[in-house]
Amino acid sequence: MIRNVQRQHPLYYMPMIFLSFPILGVFYFGYPFWTIWLTAGFTLSYLTIIHSRVSSWTNLIWLYMLAYVFYMTIAVNGGMMWFFFYFTSPLAFKFKDNLVSFRMLSYVFTMLALIIFAIVYGVDITSQIMTVLVPVINLTMLFYWKKEAEKSEQERVLWEKNQQINLLSAENERNRIGRDLHDTLGHTFAMMTIKTELALRQLEKGDLTAVRKNLEELHATSRSSMQEVRDIVTDLTYRSLSEELTSLDELLTTAGIEVHLTNELEGKLLSPVVQSTLVMLVRELANNVIKHSQAGQVRLRLFEDQAITVVMEDDGIGFGELTGRELHSIRDRLGLLTGTVTVESRKNPTRVVLTIEGDKR
């Protein structure tokens, strides 16, 4: 049983202060003394609901709590209707029930039955109005809390997805570096080993001219390999636009996003500054789509008319109200060049257009 006990947010315990009313009612307001046992059962039921995992007993405990509120409201004190607040937080955060679940339907039907009872047997209009008003307040709060719970869940899922994407991105980069090192150094070391063995055999034969030739070739190979390693290290911080687009295509596909890529800049002579800036900008656009858009399809087109233009379009949830602060990180990256970034379509589809002007060569 102890294994089933779960830690819960302190907000679950705040409503428990109101349990003092039915208890004090026994001593000061004429509530029947035996109702104190019903209240104790309600308290234990509530603690069980918020602490234990869902089991076959949960629905029975839930029904007892609803029956307690219903009975205490119609037989003891109408103000006990406020105890419906005890059900809103478990429904929103604990169970995350939908509108047709057993707990949700039983909760709504119990309040509806209480409203009908109050309208039919209510002694005055004030009590009838309160009987309708309290459920409305409860349902409003439940709706708000469910929205907050859904938002928190979406943020959690998005965070997990971003973590997975970051891991995949790092893994892709690691594999690329591994392939480059294997292809470059593996071949070089194999050749150097062969040359060394050959030089040793020639040295045993006393063929110093051949040994000298092999050592010179080893020296040249060593210098060439050092330059290739430097190129690999440099490539870790600089990637061509075509390489970046290939990598982003793989990354978006891995993230479950269908990619339609058109690169009309391929083959054009771009300056290192423009090319490196484009790489960063396209990468930032793709990261935004992966992390925030919830898109299923992305269209990316790069072309040059009067200016170099990048158009990113997706079928995701889009932007909210535009404030002018959107894509500020992309605007910051444009600082080295004359360019603009514009949200041409907020959603359905979401379209972002980026242009780079000025000296492009």
Image (spheres, rainbow, N blue to C red):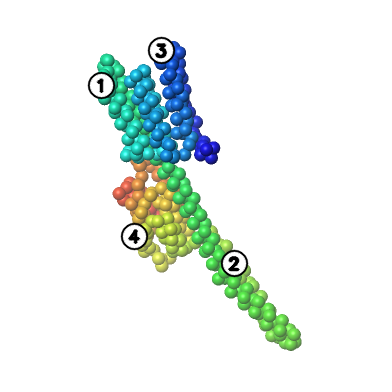
Q: Nearer the viewer, mark 2 or mark 3?
A: 3
Sequence-wise, the earlier of marks 3 and 1 is 3
Image quarter of residue 66: top left
How far is mark 4 from mark 3, CA to CA?
A: 86 Å
Residue 305 badge = 4
Question: How would you rate the neighbour count of disc 3 (Cα within 10 Å): few for under 14, some for 14-19, many for 20 or more?
Answer: few
Question: How would you rate the neighbour count of disc 2 (Cα within 10 Å): few for under 14, some for 14-19, many for 20 or more?
Answer: some
The residue where tag 1 is placed is 119
The residue where tag 3 is placed is 30
| Relative image position of residue 164 (x, y in whole percent) | 48, 52
What secondary structure is found at the residue carrying circle 4?
Answer: loop
The residue where tag 2 is placed is 229
Sequence-wise, the earlier of marks 2 and 3 is 3
Sequence-wise, the earlier of marks 4 and 3 is 3
What secondary structure is found at the residue carrying circle 2?
Answer: helix
Q: Is there CB contact under 8 Å for labels 4 and 1?
A: no
| Relative image position of residue 21 (x, y in whole percent) | 43, 18
Q: Amino acid at mark 2?
A: Val
| Relative image position of residue 202 (x, y in whole percent) | 71, 85
Q: Amino acid at mark 4?
A: Asp
Sequence-wise, the earlier of marks 2 and 1 is 1
In which quadrant is the C terminus drawn?
bottom left
